[in-house]
Image (cartoon, coloured by chain):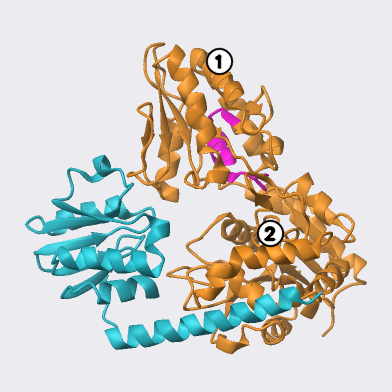
Chain colours: A cyan, B orange
Amino acid sequence: MTTDRICAFYSSGPHYVRMLRCLRENCPDATLVAAIPASFPFDAIDDLVDETVRLPDRKASRDLRGGYFALRSIRQAQCTQIVVMFDSPRLNLLSALSGTRDRHCFTVDGRFYRLNKKTAVLVASTTLRRLRGQWNFLCAWWGTRKS
Amino acid sequence: MRISLVDLLFSWPPNGGADVDLYNVATGLTQAGHDVQVVVVNDPESWERGAIHNSQFSFSLLGISGLGRDFHRKRLPRRIREAVDMWHPDVVFLGDGFLMKPYVGLALADYPLVVRYYAYEMACLRDAFHHKDGATCPNHYLKTPGVCRACALEHLGPDIKSGRPHAWAQEYLAAHAYAPGYRQIVEDYLARVSSAVVYNTTMKEHLAHHCREVHVVPGGVDSQHFTFEAPLQKAPKDTKRILMTGRASDPMKGLDVLLEAGERLYQQRRDFKIHVTVPEETALPHFALAVGWKSHKALVDYYRQADVCVVPSRWEEPFGLVALEAMATGRPVCASRVGGLQDIVLHQETGFLFDSGDSAELAKQLDVLLDNPNLRQRMGIAAHQRVYAEYRWPHIVERHYLPILESAIATHGGVHTP
């Protein structure tokens, strides 16, 4: 990983501080930008990061408006790389739309790897998955209504 | 005996206590001289199901992969049945799984069949906790199926709509657990199993009217890893360490109770620090410290550096492995009087029990223990001895599992011939 402006995107999980430490250690000259929810206790990471981007709290950031706001804030930070904590479709898509050159995932067991799915593929697969989810929910809703 | 252990969720390294439990049962049965095959379901898209990395086992392991559309209430049991038939077992042990378990059990029911329940999945359609709005749920799927079906749909809706459901919702959809007919499937399955194995008496009550035999069998502890070490001698004014381990971020685990007790204690004394295994960024009061999540390997040192361990669970903890681990290293445990914890911790012998949520009582108990190093040591030694006598895996397998499996074969009319 080259050293420049790295956005460390927070998700609820046990390894955020570990990820920041690891980034700090591997990229000592990089500007580390923590993208964290408004309620996140900044004291815990004060000595590890250079800048912060405050995001809507977790619940709010899951809807479309919150997601848009989060994405806009990250893009405004003009990072060259983004690191997320899970290789989920949602975070893949967010990182793909973040305007960064490189995207990485930092796993719970402490490994970095590159995320390289194309944005168009991510958008298409996310849309299809959502449609399938809505259909499954409709089936379950109908099944539950039957007595 | 030839024994097939079937598990719909087994992963290694483990994702939770059920994986550790199944691994130790399979290893213990192998070490006792039996032929053991573990059949697991692999789902490459899920970290929750069959993710097995760089592992070598003493038992034979068969992964059923390439499921895709075969993760279905008819096709999955059929594939598991084919895998089990190839092994020709004398008895089948059905381990972890959620709402697909009844279908798999029915597919295997002409074998002597022993099923293990690791939590309350028999009582609830929405999750394995049977816990709602901060208390034990008053409903039970087998008694109030209509209420439970509506509750499950409301709870699981967002996960289902995401199109990438977690393991529970995946099984809910595949099993058509939302349909009225699912309840009869569960009843038929429970009636056909030879015996069910549970962790505590509350769980036994849930199944008592539906199964022929229900056995309460505790989990065990790796007594070679969690070994006894005498606590450090501390002067009265030295800072004592109170430790809470496990998934402490989960509200059901009762961290709020421990912090309330800490607040009370802090008004009387300053010679303690509460260490909690929550992510390091978690905001805690000044008398507490978030130490991050610890690996299985690192955890043993944390227990050894502690003076007292606390398990303040708010829900009916099925077993309570963390209490057992602390006891194995020779530390007294203060635990809620819930589920399996009340069977593990002997009140005033190996620690103290307090009513769930009663932070005042917990504060009193901690006060007594912090004041008295001899009591801490005495209880720690008693705790270790109890674990050594009752909860070592070879002992659990020999004393509980082997008789249950042998009895299942005997009552089934002998060895199965496919």
Distance from label 2 to label 1 (Cα)?
44 Å
- Which chain does tag 1 point to? B
Please provide percent x and percent y for residue B19: 57, 60
Please provide percent x and percent y for residue B36: 66, 70
B9 left or right, relative to B293:
right
Whether the magenta-drawn stretch holds residue B324 is answered as: yes
B389 left or right, relative to A105:
right
- Residue B3 is at least partly visible in this image: no
Looking at the picture, which amino acid does disc 1 mark? Val
Question: Which of the labelled discs sits on residue B32, or is there none?
Answer: 2
Image quarter (top left, top right, bottom left or bottom right) of the C terminus of chain B: bottom right
Density class for disc 1 (Cα within 10 Å; few <14, some 14-19, many ≥20) is few
Question: Which of the labelled discs sits on residue B368, or is there none?
Answer: 1
Residue found 54% across the figure and 57% down from its top = B16
Looking at the image, which is closer to me, B243 or B397? Answer: B243
Query: CB of mark 2 within 8 Å of CB of mark 1?
Result: no
Q: Magenta segment, which residues?
A: B316-334
The total of numbered circles placed on residues is: 2
Q: Where on the picture, by quarter, is residue A76?
A: bottom left
Looking at the image, which is closer to me, B148 or B225? Answer: B148
Q: Where on the picture, by quarter, is residue A86?
A: bottom left
In the image, residue B77 sits, relative to residue B223, either above or below, namely below
Q: Where on the picture, by quarter, is residue B102?
A: bottom right
